[in-house]
Amino acid sequence: MAVKMKKILESLRVQPGKKIDLRNDYDPGCIGHFISKEDTEATTAAGIRLLAEQQDKLYAQNTYALLIILQAMDAAGKDSTIKHVMSGVNPQGVQVTSFKVPSAEELDHDYLRRCCVALPNRGNIGIFNRSYYEEVLVVRVHPEYLERQQLPPSLNDRHIWSRRFEEINNFEKYLTDNGIVVLKLFLNVSKEEQKKRFLVRVDEPDKNWKFSAADIHERTCWDGYMDAYEEMFNNTSTPYAPWYIIPADHKWFTRLAVVSAINETLDRLHLAFPEVTKEQKEALLVAKAEMERENAEAPGRKNKAVKKRGKKS
Ligand code: ATP
Ligand code: MG
């Protein structure tokens, strides 16, 4: 990966232990050293191809899984980022799960449970479109969600958020220690850009389906969300599961940054196709010899079959 891109990623990573100021330290309109969409197209396409190659090895090796957590305000581009960045990857190796308002059944369990059952298999990339992080975001901004969780009253106190941060950090350490690599991406859209995208959703008939009146209500809670996000970054960006704050006002830059962050994470795993042992190699040669013998023993049979097929058509 180019040194410049590595530097950009470094600046987007929330350094563990460092306190950030989300509004002032991270510009949603950042485009790095690029000047336009055209300027990034070749690099993004190369990144998507590299991701496909890495994923083939991840799948063949069947040792690690990659869990990508995507969080964002509405209209930041989670869905379209998944669609574009994953466009070259073998669909068999990817599992995408979207987390919505919990059902009554889900609320009858602890909050991590529904995410546990959706974790990616070894060899796969799992994408959480929203995640257990909603438990320290929307649930914090709207305390009525917490009321529905039927927690014992003594545990529903002012320390609940710091306990949840600790629980989440422990959970992600556990995943990492079991070969599930965690990469967390926040698509950072500005309030102005969100408004523009909402207006497009209202004005363009093909995009009307994407618009929800509830999104407008969430927009009025913008500052509350930014505070909750900032607290979350300051408490859950860890050496084993860091947060990246991805600028999201320019979708073309978002895609490049996301594919680069994924490739950099996979790079660190030094993925390779499994090497066959001497015995396995010998077995392969025996199998090859057997197949070659088949052809040598019955050379006419193949021709007859071809002739028959030819007559039919
Ligand atoms: P899009 O709008 O692009 O379709 P989305 O992720 O916003 O995608 P929606 O169906 O609009 O999907 O919204 C899902 C909603 O579910 C979000 O408002 C989110 O905050 C909420 N949600 C997710 N997890 C929880 C949770 N644990 N508790 C309460 N609300 C949650
Ligand atoms: Mg939504």
Image (spheres, helix red, strand yellow):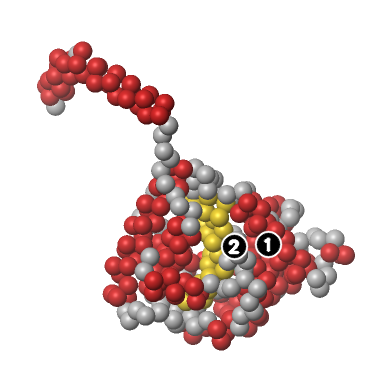
- Residue furthest to the front in view is 278
Can residue 182 be seen at all in this image of the molecule?
yes
Residue 216 x, y percent position in the rendering: 56, 78
Q: Which residue is mark 2?
A: 241
- Residue furthest to the top in view is 297
Asked which quadrant contains residue 224, the reply is: bottom right
Q: Which residue corresponds to the image point at 34% horizontal and 66% vertical from the top-left? A: 44
Q: Which residue corresponds to the image point at 58% horizontal and 66% vertical from the top-left? A: 242
Q: Which residue is mark 1?
A: 169
- Residue furthest to the right in view is 154
- Of mark 2 and mark 1, the one earlier in the sequence is 1
Residue 293 x, y percent position in the rendering: 24, 17
Q: Which residue corresponds to the image point at 66% horizontal and 53% vertical from the top-left? A: 174
- Crowding around mark 2 (Cα neighbors within 10 Å: few <14, some 14 to 19, many 20+) is some
Of residues 69 and 242, the one nearer the viewer is: 242
Q: Is residue 310 positioned above or below 83 on the image?
A: above
Q: Which residue corresponds to the image point at 40% horizontal and 29% vertical from the top-left? A: 278
